[in-house]
Image (cartoon, grey):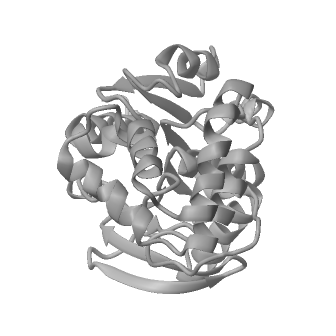
Amino acid sequence: MIFAADDTAMDVPTRLGALRVRMCGSGPPAVLWHSLFVDSATWDRVLPLLGEHRRLILIDGPSHGRSAATRRRFTLQDCADATGDILDHLGVHTPVDWVGNAWGGHVGIVFAAGKSERCRSLITIGTPVRALNPAERRRIVPLVVLYRILGPVRLLVKGVEDALLGAEPPSTDAQVISFALRGADRRGMYAAMRSVMLQRPDLTSVLAPLVTPTLIVAAEQDALWQPTEARSAAGHFPHRAFGTVPGAGHVAPLLQHAPALAELVSDFWQDQAPSAPDNGD
């Protein structure tokens, strides 16, 4: 399916409630799913570049952005299945290129594993494959409890900014994080924190057998998903690649280094394009 170049937005009914979907660009379909704590606005700086190659389908995850709050626990499989609901609603039956940031990468891995016929390629950006380790849980669990009791207080917002953007983010980028977190439904965000972060499974065994062409991207200074870990996850499979972009957090590449990230994504898409037939000339 080739989409027209108009920009549209709609609420699509799914098994996780109504999810906000934005569409822009022109070409074969690509799904973009954002990180925990933010929304699809974090893709805005790469849209003009990626939209030259694909019809972009941007999804606000449950309890994020303009999507409905999901106040119960849910799984990555639920998110992948909800994406299937969205593609069915849009009439998209050809395989999509998936681009996921952190949480969006986790959903993309599960989507590609369970719906390989619907996923042409997979790109994960700042997406740790392993579950939280004990040290991370000791640091993160108190912040989740703090959010449940007090909401998005400054201490918690600063911790999220550090993880997503690095320790000294530009003020405009920090405002993107703060706005999304402070505007979220509190019960819905708490459920998402527990579902997406605290109960995130180790996806190593899911990623390993994937035959979907996959690009694993890490920011050069991301303390939570270091390039060495990302390179190891990419392994030596012919259908898997590894790349780095500047930045110090999960979301920083999208905001602070959009041109470099867009070039990496576009080049990978181009590499997956069918070769022109050899006519013997």
- Using the rendered image of the protein, determine whether residue 109 is visible from the camera's viewpoint: no
* Residue drawn at (42%, 24%) of the image: 243
**At which x and y percent is residue 37?**
48, 56
Counting from the top left corner in percent of width and height, residue 79 is at 67, 63
Q: In this picture, is 37 found above or below 199?
A: below
Instruction: Answer above or below: position of 63 versus 39.
Output: below
Residue at 35% x, 28% y: name it: 248
Q: Position of residue 132 (x, y in %)?
A: 69, 33
Q: Who is closer to the viewer here, 34 or 57?
A: 34
User: How far across and how far down the image is residue 66, in percent?
Assistant: 45, 78
Q: Out of 182 and 146, give the one closest to the viewer.
A: 146
Q: Residue at x 55, y 66 (%)?
A: 61
The image shows residue 121, relative to residue 234, as above or below, that is below
Tell me where residue 193 sits by quadrant. bottom right
Most extreme residue toward the front, as rendered? 150
Residue at 72 percent across and 66 percent down: it is 81
Q: Is residue 95 left or right of residue 54?
A: right
Horizontally, residue 139 falls left or right of residue 277, namely right
Q: Residue furthest right?
A: 205
Do we see residue 181 in this rendering? yes
